[in-house]
Amino acid sequence: MFLKRELLRRPDMLLLHCPFCGPRNEIEFAHGGPEKKRRPDSTSDIEDEMWIEYLTVSRNPIGPVAERWWHVRGCGGWFTIYRDTRTHDIIDEGPL
Ligand SMILES: [Zn+2]
């Protein structure tokens, strides 16, 4: 228990609020990246260039971004937070 409390106090790490477990240090999580557009239902309805872009291009936005996090060393749940990539401030916690 002492170790967990000490980890929560480290100012150089993000403190993420898992909706299931509460506040935890970022070392318990895996970053899933910025939220992507919804996957197309059918690949036959879109141009090849759009499909290639969906599969291979990762956004790397500057400023506020909605991003996915996985509580890999905890409950295993996924959730979304809104974080400013310039300051690492967590602006809001979004829906699951
Ligand atoms: Zn959790």
Image (cartoon, grey):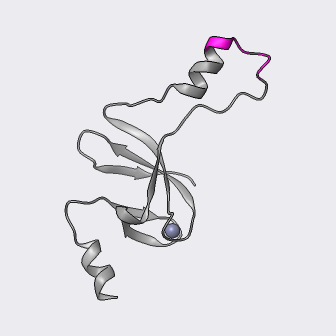
Q: In this view, does 94 lie above or below 56?
A: below
Extent of the magenta region: 43-49
Is residue 48 within the magenta segment? yes
Residue 53: x and y in percent read 57, 20
Type of secondary structure dominating the magenta stretch: loop
Residue 82: x and y in percent read 41, 46
Determine whether, in the image, residue 50 is placed left or right of residue 35.
Answer: right
Residue 40: x and y in percent read 71, 27
Residue 41: x and y in percent read 77, 29
Image quarter (top left, top right, bottom left or bottom right) of the C terminus: bottom right
Is residue 34 within the magenta segment? no
Q: Closer to the camera, 10 or 94?
A: 10
Determine whether, in the image, residue 7 is placed left or right of residue 35.
Answer: left
Q: In this view, does 3 lie above or below 37?
A: below
Q: In this view, does 68 lie above or below 52?
A: below
**What residue lies at 50% left-to-right and 71% top-to-bottom?**
74
